[in-house]
Image: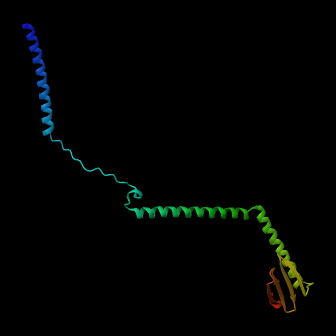
Amino acid sequence: MRSKIKKILKTVTSIVGHVIVIFCVALVCCILLLFSPLNTASAEMLHKFKSPSFSGNGMSAHYLTIENQEHSRENTIKEEKIALVEEAEREVNNSTLARFIRNLESRIYAELSRQLVDNMFGETKSESGSFELEGNKVDYSTNGQTVSLTVTDQSGGTTVISVPIGDFYF
């Protein structure tokens, strides 16, 4: 029995020793935490939006910037459309067919003008005559000193041009 008591005392002493050691370690940790120079500082956490659309700071400048960007983009798009239309018109006007038609019209007008001058001032000149040009009626007459051209348009309006004959010198 003595041996059992010794054994129990040994176990109790061991347990008590462990408890005392654990208590001492915990006490030392608490003392260290209380007196340690931990510089901890805290402040209120604030969230601020960077975009003026959400925060409101600098809002008018933000809206002005957006408006300027939209306006300049709209102008750029309009200018691009106008440039494309002008380019298409240039391509149509510079096509082979368009140049041929312009050249043909120019030659027809030159020939018509030559025939008109021959009829009015040539060797077999006529005193009067008329012809149609693009829906307009042109009457010409001469009295020996002036040539009168009367142009009547489709709506009935008239224009009279009188040119003295003696002033044609080159």
**Residue extending farthest left:** 2
Q: How many marks?
A: 0
Question: In this orientation, which residue lies closer to the viewer: 30 or 2?
Answer: 2
Q: Quadrant of the N terminus?
A: top left
- The answer to whether residue 102 is left or right of residue 52 is right
Residue at left offset 77%, top offset 61%:
96
Q: Is residue 150 above or below residue 46?
A: below
Residue 169 can be seen in this image: no
Question: In this orientation, which residue lies closer to the viewer: 146 or 49?
Answer: 49
Q: Is residue 96 above or below residue 152?
A: above
Q: Quadrant of residue 25?
A: top left
- The answer to whether residue 127 is left or right of residue 47 is right
Q: Quadrant of the C terminus?
A: bottom right
Residue 135 can be seen in this image: yes
- The answer to whether residue 85 is left or right of residue 147 is left
Q: How is the image coloured?
A: rainbow
- The answer to whether residue 40 is left or right of residue 45 is left
Residue at left offset 55%, top offset 63%:
74
Q: Is residue 161 above or below residue 2?
A: below
**Residue extending farthest front:** 1
Residue at left offset 11%, top offset 13%:
8
**Can you give x and y, in whole percent of width and height, for residue 20 in the image?**
11, 25
**Can you give x and y, in whole percent of width and height, for residue 166 in the image?**
82, 91
**Residue extending farthest right:** 124
Question: In this orientation, which residue lies closer to the viewer: 76 or 7?
Answer: 7
**Can you give x and y, in whole percent of width and height, for residue 144 in the image?**
87, 92
**Can you give x and y, in whole percent of width and height, for residue 24 in the image?**
11, 28
Residue at left offset 83%, top offset 89%:
165
